[in-house]
Image: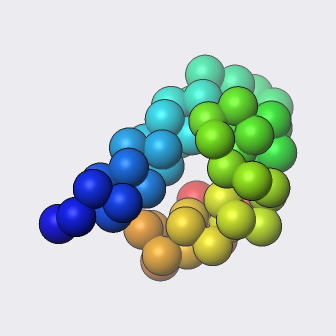
Amino acid sequence: MGPKELLRIIRFQNAIDELTKTVSKPDMTRAALDTGYYDQSHFIKDFKEFTNHTPSKY
């Protein structure tokens, strides 16, 4: 695993941690931006790749 892939995984884990802090009303856009994603679609692309689900199904 290269450094870029490792950073993607760490960034994704941080975004999931942010989402679980606000389980009652998760804000995907805010979690994505706060953890270094360029925009929500960038986050959703990684989300689908790492979990095989869309964020709403998760």
Name which quarter of the figure residue 2 lies in. Answer: bottom left
Q: Residue at x 61, y 22 (%)?
A: 21
Looking at the rendered structure, the number of numbered marks drawn on it comes to 0
Examine the image and state in which quarter residue 6 appears: bottom left
Image spot of residue 15 (x, y percent): 57, 40
Residue 23, position in %: x, y?
67, 30
Between residue 14 and residue 8, name the one nearer to us. 8
- Determine whether 48 is above or below 7 in the image: below
The residue positioned 82% from the left and 45% from the top of the image is 29
Question: Which residue in the rendered view is the most extreme toward the front?
Answer: 3
Q: Residue 8: which quarter of the image?
A: bottom left
Q: Is residue 9 visible?
A: no
Question: Which residue reaches farthest left?
Answer: 1
x 56%, y 64%: residue: 47
Which one is in front, 24 or 21?
21
Q: Quadrant of the N terminus?
A: bottom left
Name above or below for residue 13 compared with residue 20.
below
Q: Nearer the viewer, residue 54 or 39?
A: 39
Q: In the image as oriented, which residue stretches furthest toward the top?
A: 21
Residue under the image location 62 percent in, 36 percent down: 35
Residue 30: x and y, percent?
80, 35
Q: How is the image coloured?
A: rainbow
Q: Is residue 6 left or right of residue 11?
A: left
Asked if residue 51 can be seen in this view, the reply is: yes
Give the quadrant of the C terminus: bottom right
Residue 32 at what x, y percent from top left? 70, 44
48 vs 10, left or right, is right
Q: Is 44 displayed left or right of 49 in the figure?
A: right
Relative side of 8 to 38, left or right: left
